[in-house]
Amino acid sequence: MPQYQLRVYTLHSSDALTAYEKIWAQHIPSMAKHRITTHGVWTAPAAPGSDTPRLYALVSYRDADDVRERLEAYLSSPEFRADMEGFDIGAIVGLEEILLTPTVDSPLR
């Protein structure tokens, strides 16, 4: 069964979110080269009283793959560096990585 991960990026502004959406469009094929499948990418505006919007990405890794190892391989790759070129990494003010286990009846099982 694949291993799923919800990645939640908090950006410092709506402009940063717009720029990071474009980065994620590039990440999808780049991550696939490293055996990381993207199932969806979503954005959410800043909550009332906050100015930090979020980007959510649901990805999966193959059954036997070590999630941290796959992710580190991607993050140290030329593909990742090319994807991030021109983007200020400081615009990402928070990152949550949540491993998810599908329930028995989940369609993504």
Image: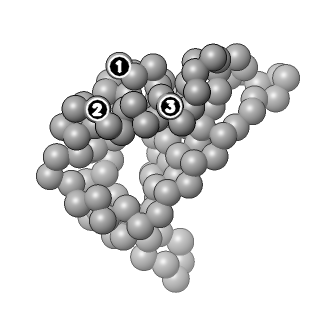
Residue plotted at (75% across, 33% down) = 101
Q: Amino acid at mark 1?
A: Lys
Which of pointers 2 and 1 lies earlier in the amino acid sequence?
1
Name the quadrant containing residue 65.
Answer: top right
| Residue 45 relative to residue 21: left or right | right
Element on which disc 3 rests: helix
CA–CA distance between discs 2 and 3? 12 Å
Judging by the rendered image, the residue that carries numbered circle 1 is 33
- C-beta proximity under 8 Å, tags 2 and 3: no
CA–CA distance between discs 2 and 1? 10 Å
What quarter of the picture does the N terminus occupy?
A: top right
Name the quadrant containing residue 108.
Answer: top right
Name the quadrant containing residue 23.
Answer: top left
The image shows residue 91 at horizontal and vertical percentages of 31, 65
Label 1: few (<14), some (14–19) or many (≥20) C-alpha neighbours in 10 Å: few
Judging by the rendered image, the residue that carries numbered circle 3 is 69
The image shows residue 98 at horizontal and vertical percentages of 63, 46
CA–CA distance between discs 1 and 3? 14 Å
Judging by the rendered image, the residue that carries numbered circle 2 is 77
Q: Amino acid at mark 2?
A: Ser
Q: Amino acid at mark 3?
A: Glu
Residue plotted at (41% across, 67% down) = 93
The image shows residue 67 at horizontal and vertical percentages of 56, 31
Foreground: disc 2 or disc 1 = 2
The image shows residue 7 at horizontal and vertical percentages of 53, 46
Which residue is outermost to the bottom?
49
Element on which disc 2 rests: loop
Which of pointers 1 and 3 lies earlier in the amino acid sequence?
1
- C-beta proximity under 8 Å, tags 2 and 1: yes
Res. 59 visible in picture: no
Label 3: few (<14), some (14–19) or many (≥20) C-alpha neighbours in 10 Å: few
| Residue 83 relative to residue 10: left or right | left
